Image (cartoon, rainbow, N blue to C red):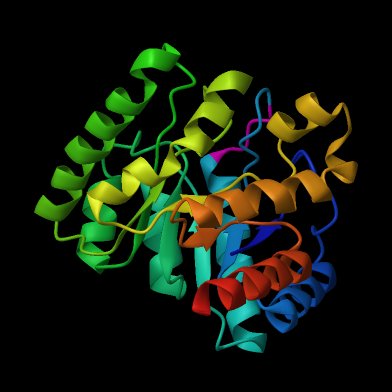
Amino acid sequence: MGILNVTEDSFFDGGRYISEAAVLKRVEQMLEEGATIIDLGAVSTQPNAIEVAENQEFETIKKYIKRILLHFPEADISVDTFRAAVADMAIQEGAAMINDVSGGADAMMFDVVGKHKVPYILTHNNRNHPLKTKELISKMLFFFGNNIEKLVSKGVKDIIIDPGFGFGKTLKQNYYLLKHLEIFSILCFPILVGISRKSMIQQVLETSSADSLTGTLTLNTIALHQKTSILRVHDVKQCFESIKLYNLIHSL
């Protein structure tokens, strides 16, 4: 999954893709490099990000879905939004799935994805309710189990689990979660991991997001070993190469 942030303040690539030409060039590049999903977002989810009004997000997402699918009709677009109204519009405009980092904070979100029968990425986000490390896994399993039941009752069949690295977890908890990630395979749904260039890498290596590629590739490889199905990344080419080598070893 290639990340496409059409925002001014995303932590790594904010401001790079805010013109139509830059967006289309980036989509073309990611597809050529091996991305099978383009994750389009118009609101930064980093802490203390600039607040974006719903109507602004709505219009930005609508504009770029239309443009992307006009030029790349084969592209599968995921829309990164926590607003049900934006998700509803995006699906009608051709989005293939919804990536909701809020974990269903909008009460209408499950109804929307259920109505359209599209895949939904369910993220564990506990920024407002910090957990103790010893209870992290059990609380997360309860969260996923409870919300999977709700989604299924709404008619959603394709659910993807995102543990939400960085969303309310301490540095220690992020690595503890990665170490035990395979536990979530008992839920019998694909696991998505979004670690790309995050602060959990920078804090350990004492580096910046710009210099976090090595750490990203290392942790993504560990995630693959822990039964991860989808990697959400900024660096598609390098990640695709890592996956290719990993899959080769495991095919022997």
Magenta region's main secondary structure? loop
Q: Position of residue 187 (x, y in %)?
A: 24, 49
The relative height of residue 88 versus residue 198 in the rendered view (above or below) is below
Residue at image position (62%, 43%) is 43
Residue at image position (61%, 36%) is 45
The relative height of residue 184 versus residue 135 in the rendered view (above or below) is below
- In this picture, residue 101 sits left or right of residue 147: right
Residue 13 seen in the figure: no
Q: Position of residue 246 (x, y in %)?
A: 61, 68
Task: Give whichever of 163, 112 is nearer the camera.
Answer: 163
Quadrant of the rendered image containing residue 117: bottom left
Q: Position of residue 180 (x, y in %)?
A: 44, 36
Task: Give whichever of 54, 41 is nearer the camera.
Answer: 41
Quadrant of the rendered image containing residue 181: top left
Q: Position of residue 110 (x, y in %)?
A: 25, 48
- In this picture, residue 236 sits left or right of residue 120: right
